[in-house]
Each structure stands twice: as C-alpha cells, then as structure tokens.
Image: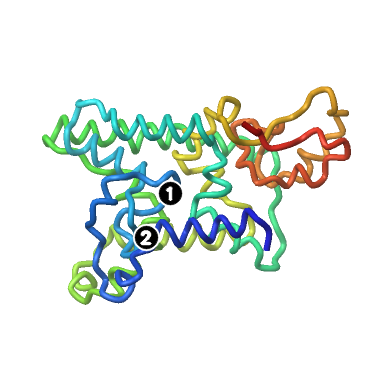
Amino acid sequence: MDKRRIVQFLTAFIYNGNLPGFVNGRIWQGNSKQLCVPGLNCYSCPGALGACPIGSLQSFVSGVGLRFPFYVLGLLILFGLLLGRLVCGWFCPFGLIQELLYKIPTPKIHKNTLTLKLTYLKYPIGILFIIIIPLAFFAWEGVGIPAFCKFICPAGTLEAAIPLITLNADLRSSLGLLFGWKFLLMLFTILISIFIYRPFCRFICPLGAWYGIYNKLSLFGIQVDKVKCNGCNHCIKVCKMDCQEVADHECINCGECLKVCPTKAISFKKL
C-alpha cells in the first residue's frame, strides 16, 4: 500500500472517528462539529466528528440569507491556498471510495474529449445548487434549503442516510420520493465509478471545482521544473484525471506522473 492510500484511509478514520455512532445511529454533536474538515464528508454521517465545508456553506446561506459566510469561505480559501486539489487526492473519503470501486476488474472508459467537456459541469452545478437555489428559496420562503446536499450529493446518501435509516426504524417509516431519487443517484455513482475513474470528483463535485482554482497557487502540491521537462507527455498519458498539463485545475496531486517522468522534472513542492 503506497503512502497516499495510507493517508486516505487514515483521513477517513479521523473524519469519522465517532465509532459508537455507527452502532447507536446518533449524529455526533460535540464541539468539533463547529469545524469544517477539508474534504467532502457528510455532517450527518453517524461517525463524523467535523462538518462538511459544502454542507456548512449551504446551511449558512440557507439559514441567514444574504449575510456573508466569512467563516466557511475563510476556511475554504485557507484550505485552497495551502493544499489546492491535493485535498481531493489525499484527504477526501468519497474520493477514496471511488478509487477502490475503480479497482474492480472491468473494461474501463478512459479520459477523452467528452470527459474533458464534462469536467466543466461541476462549476454551474456548484453555482446553481450552493448559491442560487438556496438564496432563491430564502427570497421566496424566508428560509433557504441546502440544495446540493438535499438533491444531489451521493456521499451524503452513502455516508449518512444509509447508516441512519439502517439503525433507526423511525426514519425508515418516513422515507419518500426524495430518498428514492437520492438512492438511485448514489447507485448510479457507485456503478459508474467501476468503469470511470472518480466520476463524481471530475464532473460534479463543487468542492473540487473550488480547490482547482488554487492548484497553481497552493503551498503544497505538484510542480514541474520547466528546465528538466523534455515535453514527452508521459505525465499526461498516465494521468487518469482530465489534466491538460501537470498541476492544472483538474490535478488531484496523486503523484502518478512522478513515477513515469523520465527526467524527474515533476516533484512535490517543498517549503
């Protein structure tokens, strides 16, 4: 097991360290829930010790309308400037789940011109479901809704809804069409992850879209020595993401390109 995989598993355990929650079906309400973790990890997961940044941002917008969410945005900017999409590649449990599913031996759909175009889908999805819809509901109803969590996020369904309804009979009796939709969306994400590498991260996740903005600026991450680079493009060929160059906005800093670079031009940034 390589270093990145170990970090991914450790991160999943640390994010979801409230192990009794997986037995009693109760959501942790300790002080740590006031802090956002860097990666996508549902607040309502019975094991979750911290809050999801996307969920927190939506809750803030939904609950207080036009008041600016300085705290959540400040953390997102901090995580972005420090790590960029290294968060996606190293510190996101749902990314780990997709990678493990992709290891199932089946024919694979590799990156192509269509997948490259689909990577831009996550930007309008984020703007629509995290900002526009919650604010629209606030304007009409006086209270917004966490639209991305409520209508889309398969991580929330897998990490929170499934464990909670399994452990709480009262919740099972209240299931409706919305849960049916979310369950089907989760199943589709799981299924397609077997054939396509990290499809949710590449095409849907607004957190990845946000962190991608900081990839060139982040303190930690991958960099290229332009003097050593001979332009062979081995790095782009081995990359399972839709990168057009090393460390662009789609790069999750997995480090696979380092292994194939013949001139050792690629490295992780050092302080």
* 3D distance between C-alphas at marks 1 and 2: 12 Å
Taking depth in this image into account, of 224 and 154 the one nearest to the observer is: 224
Colouring mode (rainbow / by chain / secondary structure / one colour): rainbow
Mark 1–mark 2 contact, CB under 8 Å?
no
Name the one closer to the observer, 225 or 260: 225
Against 178, residue 267 (above or below) is above
Packing grade of label 1 (10 A; few <14, some 14-19, many >=20) is many
Number of numbered discs overlaid on the protein picture: 2
Which amino acid type is marked by label 2? Thr
Residue drawn at point x = 76 percent, y = 35 percent: 266
Where residue 166 sits, quadrant-wise, is bottom left
Q: Percent position (x, y) of residue 214? A: 53, 28
Residue to which mark 1 is pinned:
40
* First in sequence: mark 1 vs mark 2: 1
Q: Please tell me the numbered disc located at residue 157.
A: 2
Q: Quadrant of residue 264?
A: top right
Q: Secondary structure at mark 2?
A: helix
Q: Residue at x 48, y 32 (%)?
A: 80
Q: Label 1 amino acid?
A: Leu
In the picture as drawn, the residue positioned furthest to the front comes out as: 271
- The residue located at (51%, 49%) in the rendering is 91
Q: Secondary structure at mark 1?
A: loop
